[in-house]
Amino acid sequence: MSNTKSAPVPIDPKMLGVLVCPKTRGPLVHDSDTHELISKKARLAYPIRDGVPILLIERARAL
């Protein structure tokens, strides 16, 4: 078994266009460096796991 990390699954631009922050209902921006969706208004970063955005406020990282 290898210890190498698999490459992040890219997020579909169409999906990104319809997703909103669950806290503010504002737009999200994809950060390809951290592989997160960023809500600038809420100052939260939502993780993406295996190509699936985890849009739970309690799972978000504060910015």
Image (tube, rainbow, N blue to C red):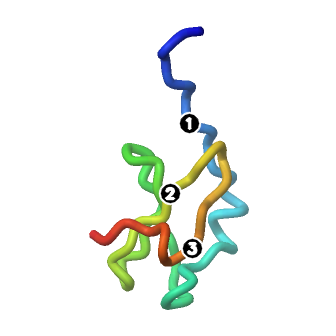
- Of the numbered discs 1 and 3, the one sitting upstream in the chain is 1
**Residue 44's image quarter?**
bottom left
Q: Amino acid at mark 1?
A: Pro
Judged left or right of residue 45, residue 62 is left
Q: Residue at x 60, y 48 (%)?
A: 49
**Residue 8's image quarter?**
top right
Residue 34 position, x and y percent, is 39, 47
- How far apart, in angstroms, are the residues tagged by discs 1 and 3? 20 Å
Residue that badge 3 annotates: 56
Q: Nearer the viewer, residue 23 or 11?
A: 23
Contact flag, marks 3 and 2 (Cβ < 8 Å)? no
Q: Amino acid at mark 2?
A: Pro
Q: Amino acid at mark 3?
A: Leu
- How far apart, in angstroms, are the residues tagged by discs 3 and 2? 9 Å
> In which quadrant of the rendered image does the N terminus lie?
top right
Residue 27 position, x and y percent, is 52, 78
Residue 9 position, x and y percent, is 63, 39
Q: Residue at x 37, y 66 (%)?
A: 61
Classify 10 Å Cα crowding around label 2: few (below 14), some (14-19), many (20 and above): many
- How far apart, in angstroms, are the residues tagged by discs 1 and 2? 11 Å
Residue that badge 1 annotates: 8
Q: Nearer the viewer, residue 32 or 14?
A: 32
**Residue 21's image quarter?**
bottom right
